[in-house]
Image: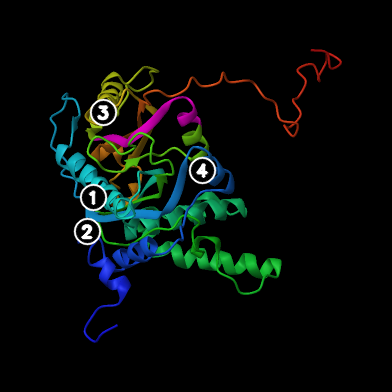
Amino acid sequence: MTQGQPPPDRANAQQLPADLPLHARERLGEMRARNLFTSDFTVNEFLLVREAGFEPLGLVMGCSIYQVVPQIPQIPQGQPGCELWDMTRALYHARELAMNRMEEEADALGADGIIGVRVEVNLATDPLRTHWDRYCQWREWSQEQGYARFDSNLGYQWAQRWEAVAWQQWQAVSQLRGWGPQPPPWAQPKNQPSFAYGQNVAEFVAVGTAVRSRDHASPHFRNARGKPFQSDLNGQEFWTLMRAGYRPVGFVMGNCVYYVPPHLLRAPAGQSCELHAYTHALYDARELAIERLQAEGEALGATGIVGVTVSEQSHSWRTAGPDVGNAALRTGELIELFVLGTAVVPIPGAPVAAKPQLVRLANDPPRASRGASGRGGEE
C-alpha cells in the first residue's frame, strides 16, 4: 500500500452510500470482499432459506433517532377526536429513514431482498415517569409484605417522600429475614432496556438478514423500484410462501396518531353502555392506518398482503401531579395505530404447490381427555 492511500476496507467504504455511517460502510465493504455472512436466522431457518434457493449475505440494519413533539389540539366539548397529522407524518418519516438505511445496506451487498425484518421503537425515558413506575413497584411490594395500604399511599408528596419510606421498609424486612446487603427490587435493572435520549425523542431500529437468489436464471426478485424486497416473514414462512408460488415484494406499513379528547372517555355514572364516540374514534384511526398499508402495497404492484399485524401504543405520558399515568380523563388520550405486513405477488410459471397435509408430531404434548372428570375418561 503506497503512502497516502486509504486501507482497502476504507476505500471500499467510500464507494457506498454517504447516508450510512463510516463504520457501517467499512463493515459492508469487508463483507463484500470476504466470503463471510452474518445472520439472525436459526439453523432451521437457514436451511429452509437455502432450500428456497437463496443464500444469506449479512445482517443489515438502519436506525433513526427522531424528535416527536405532539401538539395537543383544543377540542370543544361535544366534538369528536381527530388525527394529529404532523405527528403521524413524523413517526412515519422516522421509520422510513431507518428502513431506507437498512435497504441501502442490503443494496450495497448486492442482495435481492431482506428476510425477517423487525422494526423496534425505543421511546425516550421520561424521568418522572420512571420515578412513578418505581414508586408503583414499591407500593405493590410493600402490600405483599403485609404493610397497610395507607403506609405506601403518600398522596401529593409521593415524589419527595417515597424513597425514604421505601428504604426503611426494605431495611426492616431484610433484617427480619437475615438478608445481606442487596438492592431492593425497584432499584434493580429492568429486563426491558430504556434509553434516556431526551424528552419527546424516540429511536427507530430496523434489522433483517439480506439474502440473494442462487439461481441467476430465476426471475428478478427485486421490487418495482429496483430495490431489494423487504419482508417480516421468518425463514420457515418465506420457504412456505415460495413453495406456494408467491414471492414478497416489500414490507409495507401504515400508521395513524389519533387524539381522543377527555369528554369522549367519560361514561354516564351508574350505566353500562358503549362509549360510542370513543369507539368511533379508534375505528377511524384503524381504518386510516389500514388504508395507508393498502396504498403502499398497491404502489409495489402487490396482489395481496400477508402476515398483517395491528398494534396500538401510547406516545405521550401524563405526569402532572398525583395522577401520573391515569390522567386521560383530564387531558385526553393520544394513541398510535401501527399496521404492517408483507406485500406479495405470484411467481410467473411457478409449479403448483403440493396440497398441505395434516401432520401430528410424535412429541406433541398429550391432549387432556374431556371426560377425565366425572365421565371415566370416555370421549
Tell which circle, 2 or 3, labels the residue nearer the N-terminal end: 2
Tell which circle, 1 or 2, labels the residue nearer the N-terminal end: 2
Discs 2/3, front: 2
Discs 1/4, front: 4
Magenta-span inclusion, residue 201: no
The amino acid type of the residue labelled 4 equals Arg
Residue to which mark 4 is pinned = 50
Q: Can the viewer see residue 308?
A: no
Horizontal side of 142 relative to 374 (left or right) equals: left
Give the x, y percent position of residue 360.
Answer: 70, 26
Residue to which mark 1 is pinned = 97
Magenta-span inclusion, residue 250: yes
Vertical side of 327 occupied by 275: above or below = above
Q: Residue at x 33, y 62 (%)?
A: 196
Q: Secondary structure at mark 3?
A: helix
The C terminus lies in which quarter of the figure? top right
Disc 1 residue crowd, few under 14, some 14–19, many 20+, Cα 10 Å:
some
Q: Between 217 and 59, which is closer to the camera in this rendering?
A: 217
Cα–Cα span, label 1 and label 2: 14 Å
Residue to which mark 2 is pinned = 17
